[in-house]
Image (cartoon, grey):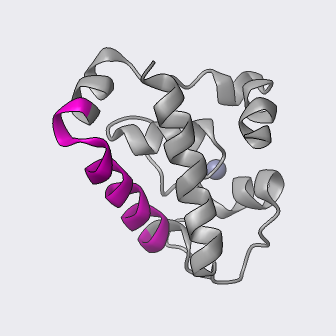
Amino acid sequence: MDILDRLARSNFRSRFKLRTKEIEYIKDKGIEKIESHARDFIRDRIAPAEPVNDGKQTPMRGHPVFIAQHATATCCRGCIEKWHKFPKGKQLSEEQQEYLVNVIMEWISKQMI
Ligand SMILES: [Zn+2]
């Protein structure tokens, strides 16, 4: 995925990595469960035209998907506009949401190796 290569060249983005604790959590829950969490977070916290607390809605730690969101610039609408070119102020379509989930899951699967 080309976008992951571009993100890997960003000093800020490439600082985010999954640690043992998060990797254990993913193994414990199963990857399908994690994907369904990613889908929920994108739908509820990111997709609305005016997300609540936009720019601060994604914690820096905790759930592995949160870490993946910072690593992949899918953490808020400003980062998404800059990196993924989906304009702010507009509800994200199902397709756009699915694309963001795919980027997150691709990043997570690379971290699991
Ligand atoms: Zn952001």
Residue at point 38%, 37% (across, down): 64
Quarter that holds the C terminus: top left
Against 73, is 12 above or below? above
Our reading of the magenta stretch's main secondary structure is helix
Residue 99 percent location from the top left of the image: 63, 61
Q: Is residue 54 visible?
A: no
Residue at point 26%, 21% (across, down): 21
Along the line of sight, the residue nearer the viewer: 101 or 47: 101
Q: Is residue 38 magenta?
A: yes
Against 54, is 103 above or below? above
Quarter that holds the N terminus: top right
Residue 106 percent location from the top left of the image: 55, 40
Residue at point 39%, 34% (across, down): 61
Q: Where, by quadrant of the figure, is residue 16 drawn?
A: top right
Against 23, is 7 above or below? below
Q: Is residue 45 magenta?
A: no
The residues colored magenta run 27-44
Q: Is residue 7 visible?
A: yes
Along the line of sight, the residue nearer the viewer: 66 or 26: 26
Residue 67 percent location from the top left of the image: 47, 37
Against 15, is 65 above or below? below
In this rendering, position of residue 103 left or right of residue 86: left
Residue at point 54%, 67% (across, down): 46
In this rendering, position of residue 111 left or right of residue 76: left
In this rendering, position of residue 32 left or right of residue 104: left
